[in-house]
Image (tube, rainbow, N blue to C red):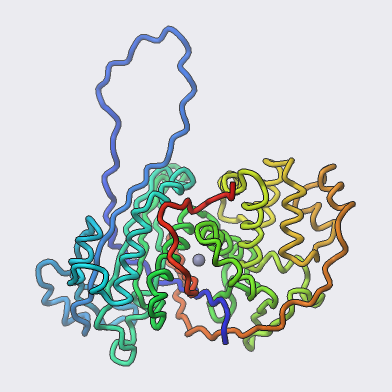
Amino acid sequence: MIGRPVALLLGLLTLALALLPLPVGAAGKKKPAETVAPPPPAPVEPKVFFKTTYRAIVEAGDYEELKTRVPDGMTVMKSEDGHSGYLLKTVPVTSEEQLIGLMGATSTAGLTDGQRGLVAAYRFSCSPAVGQYTPYFPYPAATFTIELNDTTGFDDETRFPAVQNDFWPRNGRMVWTLDGKPSAAEFTICMSPVATRGFGVDTAPQMYSIMIHELAHSLDLTAAEEGAYGKDGTHYFNERIGERAAFQEGFADYAQFALEPSLVDRYRRDLDRVKLEGENGYTTLSATDTALPAADLLRVEGVVALTLFRMSRTIPGGGRKILAAFKASNATDNTFPRFLKTYAGQNPDAVASVAAALDAETHGRLTAGELRSLLGSSPALEEYLAGRAAPADEAPGAVFAPVALPPTPVAPPQDGVTQSTTAIRQPVRLAPEDTSPFADGE
Ligand SMILES: [Zn+2]
């Protein structure tokens, strides 16, 4: 089975983050006498700090035994299985050359596929593209610890069955509040090659893409509904999931497409059919089957992602406008319809283009009433609706070969801590480093 499997794992958060010192303003400056009204304060850009840590498994064994003998320069980590653990060589990363050296090589040619993937993730985290995210962080301050976990030598699942789960790529988040408002957030992005085993030369581009996706989640306050991903806790690009979850994942997928548009055609093929999860597993329906309500298509992350991508490419300034509406609608209960309403309110001139993007990605199945509900009534929308083509009746492509995903364990989130772990497990090409993650096609 081939699909666009997207695995979700809600893992236990490793509370290993130390809050990085925040810069402080110049103290003790003499205040000048005020003769005129002071100018309005400039918008405050969030303070965002990154640090990267290389962590190599040196030994796996019984946690209680290992923690009695932790050598200098190593840390001990407990497995989610509750009894095993790891000794990890843990070193701050200061440069790509140093990282490659820590892995025992002098160039990437001397590394394993997985180690090259760690270098690729590190490159993205250092690239100018990351700076594009900064104005959109929903917290006054955010610190990131990117863990580059080197599992080399411990990839045999029969000998080390817990490694895959313990080092699955994820984005853990802790949020501090002050007077009821978020004051700072600490993110721990766990990267490792375990989600891309067997990808060969595609491992590095794949891990680069996972890094984009995980980082994009950091911008988002949306909280997926309880049980949003169904019984298996796994979500697919073409699965009908919770409305909030579909927006959350669709936005992160869009961030990947914005940086790497060549992905779009490959992913789109999966959307001919929609996966529906029930008590007894999955069924699939054609995206044009009337047994599937048209509005349910907006609960498919791939439809959200491709509609956003189309908007970014067909509307002047599309990428920036999407982010402006994203920022304005960003909230725990955000959904694609709520985002669209915000977008339409901010961009009345673009309403017809948004309706056209929705029509293109939902096979023209939304009714006029549904489009009015999503975008608000306006003369521009009425003009679009008057000239609207009849709903598409062409059958979707017949080729559909979904790929099975290994089952992904799910642990309940801890109180007060938002956690999410997701990875699109789809091989991709390495993106150019100087491309904005939110290129708007201008
Ligand atoms: Zn995700």
The percent position of residue 228, horizontal first and vertical second, equals 59, 70
- Name the residue rendered at 80%, 58% in the picture: 370
Whether residue 358 can be seen here: yes
Total count of labels: 0
User: Based on the displayed image, in which of its 4 quarters is residue 284 positioned?
Assistant: bottom right
- Name the residue rendered at 18%, 77% in the picture: 58
The percent position of residue 61, horizontal first and vertical second, equals 21, 84
Instruction: Report whether 395 appears left or right of 105.
Output: right
User: Based on the displayed image, in which of its 4 quarters is residue 46 positioned?
Assistant: top left
- Name the residue rendered at 37%, 42% in the picture: 47
Residue sticking out furthest to the top: 35
User: Based on the displayed image, in which of its 4 quarters is residue 272 positioned?
Assistant: bottom right
User: 418 or 423: which is nearer to us?
Assistant: 423
Residue sticking out furthest to the right: 386
User: 434 or 379: which is nearer to us?
Assistant: 434
Q: Quadrant of the N terminus?
A: bottom right
Instruction: Report whether 99 appears left or right of 328.
Output: left
The percent position of residue 333, horizontal first and vertical second, equals 60, 56
User: 153 or 412: which is nearer to us?
Assistant: 153
The percent position of residue 305, horizontal first and vertical second, equals 61, 62
In this view, 36 is above or below 346: above
In this view, 279 is above or below 414: below
